[in-house]
Image: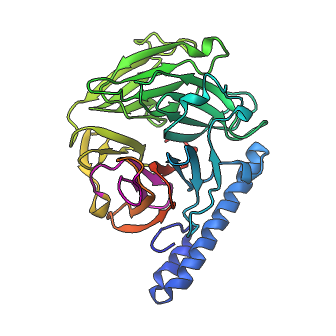
Amino acid sequence: MKNINIMAGTSCLRVLRVHWIFFTAIVLAISCKRQEAAIQAEKEMVSTGKPQTELATCCWVSITNQATRKVEVYDPADASWTTPKWSWMPATALSYNATSELPLWDTPTDVKVRNNTVFANTAQVITATSYRLATIARYTGTGTRGQKLWVMGFNDTTRLHAMEILPDGNSVVASAGAAWPQGWIRIYSSSQPSPNHGVNTQYYFISAHAVLWDQTHQVLWALGNELRKYGYNTPRSGGTITNPKLDLLTSYTVLPSAWGHDLAADVNNPDQLYLTTNGGVYIFHISTGTFSDVPGAAQDTFVKAISSQPGQNTLVETKPGAGCTLNNWCTSVVNFYNATNGAAAGSRTVSGAAIYKGKTFDPNYY
C-alpha cells in the first residue's frame, strides 16, 4: 500500500507522523481502514438489515476490463490485484436474453454503483454500458446479484460510453457515436414496468462521453465536446417520471482543451467536479463556472477515467498504454494521486487486463 492514503481516524494520522517507523505506520493504517469499514458495516446493517458483505463499500475501485469483457471490482488495500472482490457480465443465468441482448455486450465502457431502492427488493444497483448495451442490474437485495433489472440494446454505430441512474430510477445514457459529429444523450423511463420502460427523449450532443447526477445541485452534468448542465423534469421541460425530459440550463462551450472523456464528483467538495479531456485533467468550479488544472503528476493527457476517494484525499486515474496492447485506449494499470498536490501515490496492476476505466466504486450521489 505504499503511499496510498487509506487511513481513517485521528489515531491513524498520528501513526503516519512517525515517519521513522514507516512500515509499522502502513500496517496500522490498513488496520484502521478495516476498522472504519467494520463500523460503517454495522451502521448499514442497522439501517438496511443486510450484512456488509452485500453492500458496496468505499473505497473499492471498479474497472471495465475489455480483455475479460467483465466489470471487476478490487480493493486498493490489497497489494496484489489478482482476484477481484466481485466481477460481472450479462449472462442468461442473470435473465439476459441470449439472442437479443448478450451479443450486444462486447467492450464494457462504464460502470457505477448507486444506492437505489426504486426497483423491488433492492438497496443498490449497478449501471453498466458496452458499445451497444446499457443495463441496470441488482447489486444488493432479494435475488441474485447482477440480475437484470432493465436493459436497452442499440445499433453498431451507437458507441455508448457512459450511463447514470437518477434517484427516481430513470436513467441517462451517453453515446459518442461512431464518427464526428455524431453523439447524443438519451433519457429513459427505466423506472417504469415493461413495456413503458423504453420511453425516451434524445438530445444531440457531439461526442458525448460522460453523464453524472449532482445530488447537491439537483442537476445532471454531461461531457462531450463541451460541458453541459441539465435540469431534470423541470416545469419548462414538461417531463414526468413516465416520460422524462431534460432541460438545458447552461453550456460551457470552451473546455480547457478539446474532447472531454470523463466526469466525476469531487466527493470532498460539492462545489467541484473533476473532468478529463484529450489535453489534460481539470477541476470545474461550479459556483464560478471556471476551470483549473489539477496539480502535479495527476495532470496528464488522454486520461480516460478520473474519480476521487471519499475521505481519502486520493484521486484515481487510468490512461492508455501501460501493459496493454488489445487496443489503443486500454491499460493494465490504475494510478493513485494525492488530491492536494497531485503527487503520485502508488498504482495497482491487473495482469493481462485491458482497462478502459478504473474508478471509485462509491454508491453515493454527491
Residue, far bottom = 20
Which quadrant holds residue 48?
top right
Q: Nearer the viewer, residue 86 or 119?
A: 86
- Marker count (numbered): 0
In the displayed structure image, the side of residue 119 where residue 183 appears, left or right: left
In the displayed structure image, the side of residue 85 where residue 224 appears, left or right: left
User: Where does residue 236 sit, x and y in percent of width and height?
Assistant: 40, 12
Above or below, 70 relative to 312: above
Q: Nearer the viewer, residue 319 or 246?
A: 319
Q: Nearer the viewer, residue 158 or 218?
A: 158
Which residues make up the magenta segment? 299-325
What residue is at 58 percent from the left and 60 percent from the top?
75
Q: Nearer the viewer, residue 334 or 117?
A: 334
What residue is at 26 percent from the left and 37 percent from the top?
259
User: Where does residue 104 sit, x and y in percent of width and height?
Assistant: 54, 28
Secondary structure that dominates the magenta span? loop
Which quadrant holds residue 258?
top left
User: Where does residue 163 sit, x and y in percent of width and height?
Assistant: 49, 32
In the displayed structure image, the side of residue 195 where residue 128 appears, left or right: left
What residue is at 50 percent from the left and 32 percent from the top?
164
Looking at the image, can residue 286 be seen? no
Above or below, 84 relative to 90: below
Looking at the image, can residue 80 be seen? yes
What residue is at 35 percent from the left and 62 percent from the top?
340
Which quadrant holds residue 83?
bottom right
Q: Is residue 107 magenta?
A: no
Q: Is residue 309 magenta?
A: yes
Figure colour scheme: rainbow
